[in-house]
Image: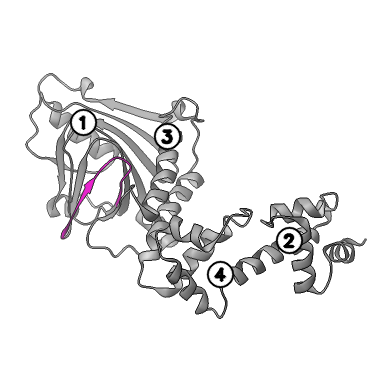
Amino acid sequence: MISDDIIHVTTDDAPVHGRTAYWQQKTAELLVSMDYADVADDELIASQRVVQRGPLRAVHLTCSPHVVERGWRLVKRYQKPSIFMCILINGEGFVYQGSKCAQMAPGDIVIYDVSRPYIHGFTTTAEHVTYDLPASEFYTRFGAWNEPAVVHLSAQFGTGAVASRHLANNARKLFKLAPHLPAETNSTQIWQAADNVMTALRPYSPAEDLRIATIRQFALDQLDNPDLSIHHLSNALGVSTRLIQRRFASLGTSFSDWLRLQRLEWAAALLANPSLSKVSITEIALECGFADASHFSRTFAKHFQCCPMAWRRERTRV
């Protein structure tokens, strides 16, 4: 459980004189080495809770306004091959890296490479969660991160809104920020949360194959939703319906034809599974996203030249 392995430090633990120095040291131990810019000892009020999940680390920070900087001196002296994925829960903040300054509002996500200099600041009292993702594992899962500047996802629209909901929910579970949520999160769930954020970025990639892969994976995750449509995808991914149509046209098909085929193949696999022989054909049809059993049976028979019942009987025969 979270309560068994969480590390909690606050500026209340600091000496009367030397609060900033104390906090700088603790942050270096628990997250990364940074300089605190022009913060008087009696002005900094902060609390950190840190959760470790295998090689992953997440930090929940509540703090008064302040600014930290990780310049080339610290980057070279205290090397840390990590990607930071951060979500602002409350307050206002910003991240400056490369030639870009990302202004953060509640729910916004920023991603940046810790091996490059950056400045991270909070202009109000704030609540913030940082996911410290080891670069080697990040690259294996998502490919090399070659962005020279901070990447910003707004929680207000498009794919950023979808990613924000996923990451905020994960953070709430991880740190039990809402009483009704379970306080257990393993490393797999953290990587899944990171994958949701990276999926949100991919439609903006110049790589065409990456875009279609993202769209298809999003649709595959919702095959059981009978309301899944090209307009649903468009709204959820923050891309136009015309772009989605072009992506499927490049594969020699349309979205509706591709979706129908995926659902039919899924249903065919379920019908051929002997352990599901007691599950009705209607239940399987609904599970695979078909609105009703009669439509499913007609569509199945037209595609496979065999009705669902005969398909099941032939493939589950002992």
Q: Note whether 125 is above or below 265 in the view shown.
A: above
Residue 301 at what x, y percent from top left?
Answer: 80, 70
Asked if the residues shown at circle 1 and circle 3 are in contact, with their CB atoms under 8 angstroms apart, the answer is no
Measured in 3D between alpha carbons, the distance from the residue under mark 4 to the one under mark 1, in whole angstroms, is 46 Å
Disc number for residue 125: 1
Asked if the residues shown at circle 3 and circle 4 are in contact, with their CB atoms under 8 angstroms apart, the answer is no
As drawn, which residue projects farthest toward the right?
A: 318
Measured in 3D between alpha carbons, the distance from the residue under mark 2 to the one under mark 1, in whole angstroms, is 52 Å
Amino acid, disc 4: Phe
Of the numbered discs 4 and 1, the one sitting upstream in the chain is 1
In this figure, which residue is indicated by the disc labeled 4?
Answer: 255
Q: Nearer the viewer, residue 223 or 83?
A: 223
Give the magenta range. 99-110
Measured in 3D between alpha carbons, the distance from the residue under mark 3 to the one under mark 4, in whole angstroms, is 35 Å
Q: Nearer the viewer, residue 27 or 106?
A: 106
Q: Nearer the viewer, residue 261 or 272?
A: 261
Residue 230 at what x, y percent from top left?
Answer: 52, 63
In this figure, which residue is indicated by the disc labeled 2?
Answer: 267
Q: Nearer the viewer, residue 136 or 237?
A: 237
Amino acid, disc 2: Ala
Measured in 3D between alpha carbons, the distance from the residue under mark 1 to the one under mark 3, in whole angstroms, is 19 Å
Residue 87 at what x, y percent from top left?
Answer: 32, 43
Measured in 3D between alpha carbons, the distance from the residue under mark 2 to the one under mark 4, in whole angstroms, is 18 Å
Amino acid, disc 1: Thr
Of the numbered discs 1 and 3, the one sitting upstream in the chain is 1
Query: Can residue 210 be seen in the rendering of this structure?
Result: no
Of the numbered discs 2 and 4, the one sitting upstream in the chain is 4
In this figure, which residue is indicated by the disc labeled 3?
Answer: 172
Residue 32 quadrant = top left
